[in-house]
């Protein structure tokens, strides 16, 4: 039986404390897993188990301001700050990690490798995120997060209903299936998402910001390491055109389009997603 993941608090950029769960053999190839905005490292739980069982060392991080990680100052949530955190984690490892990032985690990995410090990762997997994302898709995500930010939820079932309305292509899950890990209970008895509300201030500023798209495109064009783009075929964030444009920027990238999945690919089709990730990583090993 595979040992349970171990929890650690480590220093991110500027000494900010980051929460990570580590599973798999100590001498396994490290795989750094960074979740999307508003999520926590628990989003990777099943994928981390698959990687660990295959001999990899899975390192799932709560991004700054999320989950059990420390909150930053209100101006400390730019993608560059999160990218620097990923590089700080990479610095603690004995070899370059394979980087797998979903949505915001993917953008952070892209900026880390493509702009801040090229050569930091063994490979880079972007999960349903590219430069030039659909503004409507971004608005839908940010709008959902804003809608419940202040008032929160009276019960876990109420939160489960809200998630079900957002993830229409996924079967509704009961409130007991790990939902409490994504929420914190306030002194007023209401549940709120487990992230710093100040984080969304940066997200709102970035909406429709063409300069951000230019930054991401420049980072993508500079990538020389093995790259993997995974898209949810029903994604409203990464269009087919955006995926094709990314492949023009990074012609050596592998592309997988997962049928039946939306932007939340990891949760929508986890078995298929995990198999695709493992196949990509195994392919890198075969190439030496």
Image: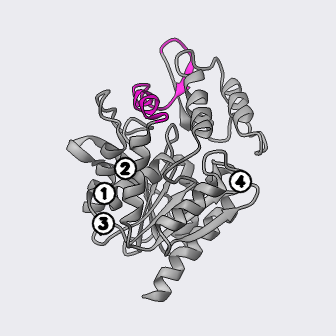
Q: Is residue 144 visible?
A: yes
- Magenta residues? 187-208
**Distance of mark 1 from mark 2, alpha carbons?**
9 Å
Q: Position of residue 195 (x, y in %)?
A: 45, 32
Dots 1, 2 in contact, CB < 8 A: yes
**Distance of mark 2 from mark 4, alpha carbons?**
28 Å
Quarter placement of the N terminus: bottom right
**Distance of mark 3 from mark 1, alpha carbons?**
11 Å
**Distance of mark 3 from mark 2, alpha carbons?**
19 Å
**Distance of mark 3 from mark 4, alpha carbons?**
30 Å
Q: Is residue 20 visible?
A: no
Q: Position of residue 147 (x, y in %)?
A: 60, 22
The residue that label 4 is drawn on is 261
x 30%, y 43%: residue: 81
Mark before the other along the chain sequence, 3 or 4: 3
Closer to the camera, 212 or 87?
Answer: 212
Q: Residues within 10 Å of mark 1 (few under 14, many from 20)?
A: some
Mark before the other along the chain sequence, 4 or 1: 1
- On residue 115, which mark appears? 1
Where disc 2 sits, the SS reads helix
The residue that label 2 is drawn on is 215
x 61%, y 46%: residue: 237
The residue that label 3 is drawn on is 120
Q: Residues within 10 Å of mark 2 (few under 14, many from 20)?
A: some
Where disc 4 sits, the SS reads loop
x 55%, y 37%: residue: 181
Mark before the other along the chain sequence, 1 or 2: 1
Magenta-colored stretch includes residue 88: no
Judged by depth in the image, the label closer to the viewer, 2 or 4, is 2
Judged by depth in the image, the label closer to the viewer, 4 or 1, is 1
- On residue 161, which mark appears? none
Mark before the other along the chain sequence, 3 or 2: 3
């Amino acid at each position: 039986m595979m040992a349970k993941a171990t929890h650690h608090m480590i220093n991110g950029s500027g000494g900010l404390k980051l929460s990570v769960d580590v599973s798999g053999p100590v001498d396994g190839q490290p795989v750094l897993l960074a979740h999307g905005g508003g999520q926590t490292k628990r989003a990777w739980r099943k994928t981390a188990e698959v990687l660990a069982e295959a001999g990899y060392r899975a390192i799932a991080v709560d991004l700054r301001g999320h989950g059990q990680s420390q909150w930053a100052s209100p101006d400390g949530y730019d993608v560059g700050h999160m990218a620097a955190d990923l590089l700080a984690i990479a610095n603690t490892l004995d070899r370059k990690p394979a980087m797998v990032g979903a949505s915001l985690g993917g953008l952070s990995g892209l900026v880390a490798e493509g702009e801040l410090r090229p050569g930091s990762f063994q490979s880079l997997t972007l999960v349903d995120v590219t430069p030039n994302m659909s503004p409507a898709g971004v608005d839908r995500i940010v709008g959902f997060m804003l809608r419940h930010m202040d008032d929160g939820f009276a019960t876990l079932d109420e939160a489960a209903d809200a998630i079900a309305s957002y993830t229409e292509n996924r079967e509704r899950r009961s409130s007991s299936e790990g939902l409490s890990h994504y929420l914190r209970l306030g002194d007023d008895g209401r549940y709120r998402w487990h992230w710093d509300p100040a984080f969304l201030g940066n997200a709102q500023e970035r909406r429709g910001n063409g300069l951000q798209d230019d930054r991401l495109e420049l980072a993508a064009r500079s990538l020389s390491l093995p790259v993997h783009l995974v898209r949810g075929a029903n994604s409203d964030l990464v269009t087919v055109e955006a995926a094709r444009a990314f492949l023009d920027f990074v012609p050596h990238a592998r592309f997988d389009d997962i049928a039946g999945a939306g932007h939340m690919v990891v949760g929508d089709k986890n078995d298929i997603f995990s198999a695709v990730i493992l196949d990509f990583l195994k392919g890198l090993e075969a190439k030496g």
